[in-house]
């Protein structure tokens, strides 16, 4: 999606989100030079959650910028998620400026590296598939 120009990834979910998931979103943001928001379901007292799904309602939503910095999280009271709408702001102008930088260009305009997978034709040009018949990426 980033290669097609996406600047913000929205990932709605209804599952247990742990601090490791926050780290994963942070890494995804950095490697795609895009902001990301992981939005989770939160149960409240007036909406009973079936026992089989009790762990899927822990809130713990997170928003990260294109550098992987956490800019907003869902609130908790102790170990209990707080229901509510939480806002995250992203400076799209700065994101676009980053994408124009040398590092941003490396992330948003990847090159083939056929030497990594031994994807060479006998004439020295890149092959369309490797030794195991797998296709190379189309970019």
Image: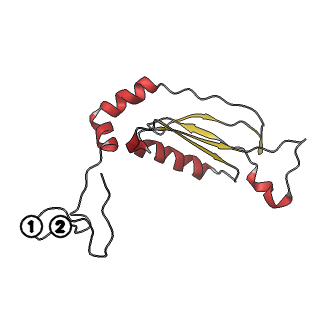
Q: Secondary structure at mark 1?
A: loop
Q: Secondary structure at mark 2?
A: loop
Q: Is residue 8 above or below residue 48?
A: above
Residue at mark 2? 120
Query: What label sits on residue 123 in the rendered view?
Result: 1
Q: Is residue 126 left or right of residue 91?
A: left
Q: Is residue 49 left or right of residue 70?
A: right
Q: Position of residue 29 (x, y in %)?
A: 47, 42
Single out the residue that lies furthest toward the left: 123
Choose between 57 and 3: the one closer to the eye. 3
Q: What residue is drawn where x is 17% and y is 67%?
A: 120
Q: Is residue 46 left or right of residue 87?
A: right
Q: CA distance from mark 2 to mark 1?
A: 8 Å
Q: Is residue 15 above or below residue 117?
A: above
Q: Position of residue 84 (x, y in %)?
A: 75, 33
Q: Position of residue 35 (x, y in %)?
A: 49, 36
Q: What residue is drawn where x is 22% and y is 67%?
A: 119
> Mark 2: few, some, or many residues within 10 Å (few <14, many ≥20)?
some
Q: What residue is drawn where x is 31% and y is 76%?
A: 132
Q: Residue 109: which quarter of the image?
A: top left
> Mark 1: few, some, or many residues within 10 Å (few <14, many ≥20)?
few
Query: What label sits on residue 48 in the rendered view?
Result: none
Choose between 8 and 57: the one closer to the eye. 8
């Amino acid at each position: 999606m980033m290669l097609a120009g996406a600047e913000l990834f929205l990932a709605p979910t209804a599952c247990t989100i742990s601090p490791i998931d926050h780290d994963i979103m942070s890494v995804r943001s950095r490697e795609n030079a895009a902001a990301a928001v992981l939005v989770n379901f939160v149960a409240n007292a007036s909406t009973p959650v079936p026992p089989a799904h009790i762990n899927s309602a822990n809130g713990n939503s997170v928003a990260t910028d294109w550098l992987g910095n956490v800019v907003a999280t869902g609130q908790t009271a102790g170990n209990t998620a707080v229901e509510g709408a939480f806002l995250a702001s992203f400076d799209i102008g700065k994101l676009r400026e980053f994408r124009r930088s040398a590092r941003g260009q490396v992330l948003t305009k990847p090159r083939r590296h056929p030497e990594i997978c031994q994807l060479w034709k006998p004439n020295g040009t890149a092959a369309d598939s490797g030794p195991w018949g797998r296709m190379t990426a189309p970019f």
